[in-house]
Amino acid sequence: MPGLTLVPVGAVPAGFLSALSARIVSLFAFETVRARDPLDPSFSRDPERGQLHSTRLLEALAAACPPGDGERILGVADADLFIPILTFVFGEAQLSGPAAVLSLTRLRPEFYGLPRDDSVLLARTVKEALHELGHTYGLLHCRRPDCVMRASTNAGEVDLKPALFCRSCAAATRS
């Protein structure tokens, strides 16, 4: 069975990563989940945008992925991410590759002027982690509303989707 390495990108609390790890293990068939030392994201920061270029982070994460069939690496950033053609992204993954990254910034209720709610942040992060990891298994966006692979362009859409794959997407992650 494959393993997953979680990498904090910048300063992400260890307790949060532990809670995320426990939830991922309960929902995805990873044999082990390991934590690594933080990745310094300064090489990916765009000074004009004040955001991190997610594709640059993916390249660094892929290079750090442990060898082995089915191994995955997931970066968790406490900074806003972008790709040049979009204002922001919740995350990005290598399609059928080992690496994925996600951002906590726009998953936080307080980003939208709401009170801090760590349970909402964790629930959203789990969904986005599963979504990005699904891409590493070759999954594209799914049209089914009951699938975590459904595309999300705002936090409300993240809230509406479940932390589960539909049957066809789940089957693809096991093959």
Image: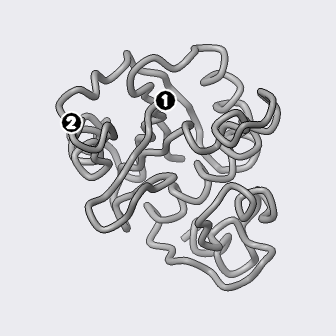
The kind of residue tagged 2 is: Pro
The local secondary structure at tag 2 comes to loop
- Looking at the rendering, which quadrant does residue 19 occupy? top right
Residue at x-position 68% and y-position 81%: 168
Which numbered disc covers residue 114? none
User: Is residue 86 positioned above or below 159 on the image?
Assistant: below
How many angstroms separate mark 1 from mark 2 (CA)? Answer: 17 Å
Q: Residue 67 vs residue 119: left or right? A: left
Q: Position of residue 41 (x, y in %)?
A: 28, 28
Which numbered disc covers residue 78? 1
Q: Position of residue 44 (x, y in %)?
A: 22, 37
The kind of residue tagged 1 is: Asp
User: Is residue 153 positioned above or below 9 on the image?
Assistant: below
The crowding category of the residue bearing disc 1, from other C-alpha atoms within 10 Å (few below 14, some 14 to 19, many at least 20), is some
Do tag 1 and tag 2 residues touch (Cβ < 8 Å)? no
Q: How is the image coloured?
A: one colour
Residue at x-position 29% and y-position 44%: 49
25, 57: nearer the viewer: 57
39, 24: nearer the viewer: 39
Residue at x-position 62% and y-position 80%: 142
Q: Residue 167 vs residue 31: left or right? A: right
Q: Which residue is mark 2?
A: 47
- Looking at the rendering, which quadrant does residue 23 occupy? top right
Label 1 vs 2, first from the N-terminus: 2
Q: Residue furthest bottom?
A: 143
User: Is residue 143 positioned above or below 97 on the image?
Assistant: below
How many numbered dots are placed on residues in this image? 2
46, 150: nearer the viewer: 46
Q: Position of residue 147 (x, y in %)?
A: 73, 72
Q: Position of residue 170 (x, y in %)?
A: 68, 70
The local secondary structure at tag 1 comes to loop
The crowding category of the residue bearing disc 2, from other C-alpha atoms within 10 Å (few below 14, some 14 to 19, many at least 20), is few
